[in-house]
Image: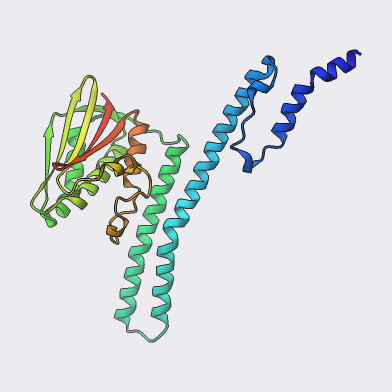
């Protein structure tokens, strides 16, 4: 009788054990129902469900990463193969072959940068993006980014303008310059000739705000929430060769989040404004 009672008392444990054993990598959306077990096992079931949620999140990120890489690399690889096959299909002059090689090199360089950017985002997804912080004057960092883009801005007839204070912030200089560079590159892409891109810096309530503002065609409200998604483009048909991989803003967000900050965007008839907010 005692053994029978013990066996019956262990029935809920055996039931939970069988359910757990039946869960595979294809069933990570399955959750155990805590209401079907004795109260003594409820916390165990809840903890198991939380663990499965974390595992599912990791699997989803890995799957999305692989799918993103495959999607973005498939077309350029096909183009490279086609160009090479055409070049080899008949006799070519040295100049013609050099043109093909230079074109292929440009595409391969772009692909290499994209893969590097994706690996950077993968680090961020796995909480491995750790800024090497030191006290920075953001006005100086903006100046360095301006120096890098000065020639391109002049070529496009766009003025780069800084307004604001010499904001002090604890941050990783390379990461923050990369974030600012991505925002400035994006602004240059859509700013009409003869206009100005304005970078503002101010300290508000122990927070440092850096904004990048550019005039141009406003972005429709339905696109704004997805601008920081990797590979998201408002108008894919306008994506021109050499004008980015569609993950620049995703990198901006990952860098800002690693610094315990936020990034937001607004857009209207006056222009588009990205605002980074960091702890002072």
Task: Name the residue: 34% across, 74% down.
Answer: 100
Describe residue 157's horizontal placement relative to residue 66 as left or right.
left
Quadrant where the N terminus lies? top right
Colour pattern of the rendering: rainbow
Which residue appears farthest toward the right when viewing the image? 1
Depth order, front residue of 239/267: 267
| Residue 22 relative to residue 275: left or right | right
Quarter of the rendering occupied by the C terminus: top left
Give the quarter of the image for residue 45. top right
Task: For residue 272, say whether it is visible.
Answer: no
Task: Give the percent coordinates (x, y) of residue 209.
Answer: 22, 29
Q: Nearer the viewer, residue 220 or 181?
A: 220
User: What residue is rendered at 57% in x and 35% in y?
Assistant: 55
Residue 246, image x, y percentages:
34, 51
**Quadrant in the picture for residue 211:** top left
Residue 31: percent from the left, percent from the top? Answer: 61, 31
- In this rendering, the answer to whether 1 lies above or below 11 is above
- The quadrant in which residue 131 appears is top left
Tell me where residue 145 appears, x and y as whole percent. Answer: 21, 43
Residue drawn where x is 64% and y is 28% of the image: 32
In this orientation, does residue 233 appear? Answer: yes
């Amino acid at each position: 009788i005692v053994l029978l009672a013990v066996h019956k008392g262990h029935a809920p444990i055996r039931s939970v054990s069988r359910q757990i054993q039946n869960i595979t990598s294809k069933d990570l959306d399955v959750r155990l129902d805590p209401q079907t077990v004795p109260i003594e096992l409820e916390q165990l079931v809840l903890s198991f469900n939380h663990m499965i949620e974390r595992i599912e999140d990791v699997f989803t990120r890995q799957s999305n990463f692989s799918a993103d890489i495959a999607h973005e690399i498939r077309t350029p690889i096909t183009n490279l193969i086609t160009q090479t096959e055409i070049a080899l299909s008949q006799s070519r002059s040295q100049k013609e072959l050099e043109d093909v090689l230079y074109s292929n090199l440009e595409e391969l360089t772009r692909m290499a940068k994209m893969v590097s950017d994706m690996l950077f985002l993968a680090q961020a997804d796995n909480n491995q993006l750790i800024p090497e912080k030191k006290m920075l004057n953001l006005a100086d960092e903006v100046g360095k980014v301006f120096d890098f883009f000065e020639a391109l801005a002049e070529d496009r007839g766009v003025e780069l303008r800084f307004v604001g204070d010499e904001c002090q912030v604890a941050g990783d200089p390379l990461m923050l310059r990369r974030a600012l560079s991505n925002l400035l590159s994006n602004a240059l892409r859509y700013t009409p000739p003869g206009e100005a891109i304005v970078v503002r810096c101010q300290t508000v309530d122990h927070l440092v705000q850096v904004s990048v503002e550019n005039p141009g065609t406003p972005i429709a409200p339905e696109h704004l929430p997805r601008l920081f998604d990797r590979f998201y483009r408002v108008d894919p048909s306008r994506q021109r060769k050499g004008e980015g991989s569609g993950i620049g803003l995703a990198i901006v967000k990952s860098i800002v989040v690693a610094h315990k900050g936020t990034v937001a965007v607004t857009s209207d008839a006056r222009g588009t404004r990205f605002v980074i907010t960091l702890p002072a």
